[in-house]
Image (spheres, helix red, strand yellow):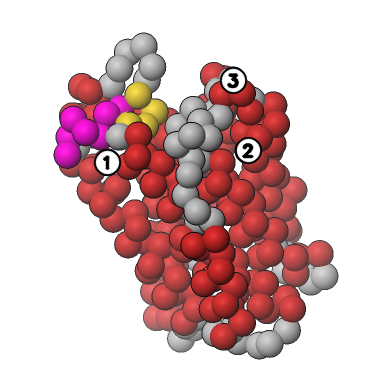
Amino acid sequence: MNVFRILGDLSHLLAMILLLGKIWRSKCCTGISGKSQILFALVFTTRYLDLFTNFISIYNTVMKVRGGFLLCAYVTVYMIYGKFRKTFDSENDTFRLEFLLVPVIGLSFLENYSFTPLEILWTFSIYLESVAILPQLFMISKTGEAETITTHYLFFLGLYRALYLANWIRRYQTENFYDQIAVVSGVVQTIFYCDFFYLYVTKGRSWDNSTDAGTGLRSYSSIQ
């Protein structure tokens, strides 16, 4: 198995664990977009339906379902909208999901590899993942600040996507394998992270200096 894929999956899982750990320790969902988490839960649900009908590998089953993405995604959504719903900042989590879901659903029916239910759902999940982080980025831009742990969460999500791009390049070189839908969607997703990556890497010291000791919030307005 390609090392870039394994590192990418671990980076993705680490991002989700960081977010879950933050919510559990602080008993607070402030600064986290519940809408982005709903979209990610929808992404994993529609992508991994085939794991219940086709066995690929133990790694795939454990990482994607039982101990990994699906479990973390649903627990995160439950914590935001259930256990700690009183701390959820719904006033700032205002991105209109239909602006993402409607075009993604339409594109999934128009551009896919096979017009079958599972294939369309898989394609839908790939397209949706490329834009699922937008409500979170919109929320940060709207409030002008984010908790330190939220920036780390976004960093590891971006790193996951960058590693998967490296995985696709490696597979093309060694196996002559090229998945146009996954690659194009991955590039689009990476573009959304580019500005955040630049600020994270080049302005990290400024963020640390602008962090409020009482709230753990980093002010974006202080570095823009």
Residue behind mark 3: 27
Question: In terms of sequence position, does the residue under pointer 3 or pointer 1 come before the other?
Answer: 3
Q: Look at the picture and state if 206 lies above or below 74.
A: above
Give left or right: position of 134 versus 98: left
Relative to 20, residue 49 above or below: below
As helix, strand or loop, the secondary structure at mark 3 comes to: loop
Amino acid, disc 3: Lys
Q: Earlier in the sequence, mark 3 or mark 2?
A: 3
Choose top left, top right, bottom left or bottom right for residue 23.
Answer: top right
* Residue under the point 59% across and 72% down: 105
- Quarter of the picture containing the N terminus is bottom right
Q: Nearer the viewer, mark 1 or mark 2?
A: 2
- Residue at 53% x, 35% y is 90
Question: From the viewer's perspective, is 65 left or right of 162?
Answer: right
The furthest residue to the right: 53
Is residue 219 in the magenta section?
Answer: yes
Task: Name the residue type under label 2.
Answer: Thr
For marks 1 and 2, the one nearer the N-term is 2
> Mark number for residue 200?
1
Q: CA distance from mark 1 to mark 2?
A: 24 Å
Residue under the image location 27 percent in, 41 percent down: 200
Q: Is residue 69 left or right of residue 51?
A: left
Q: What amino acid type should be assigned to the residue bearing mark 1?
A: Tyr
Q: Nearer the viewer, residue 156 or 107?
A: 107
User: Which label sits on residue 211?
Assistant: none
Element under label 2? helix
Q: From this viewpoint, is residue 62 visible?
A: no
Which residue corresponds to mark 2?
Answer: 76
Q: Is residue 34 above or below residue 107?
A: above
Local packing at callout 2 (Cα closer than 10 Å; few below 14, some 14-19, many 20+) is many
Residue at 81% from the left image edge and 64% from the top image edge: 52
Q: Which residues are magenta?
A: 218-224
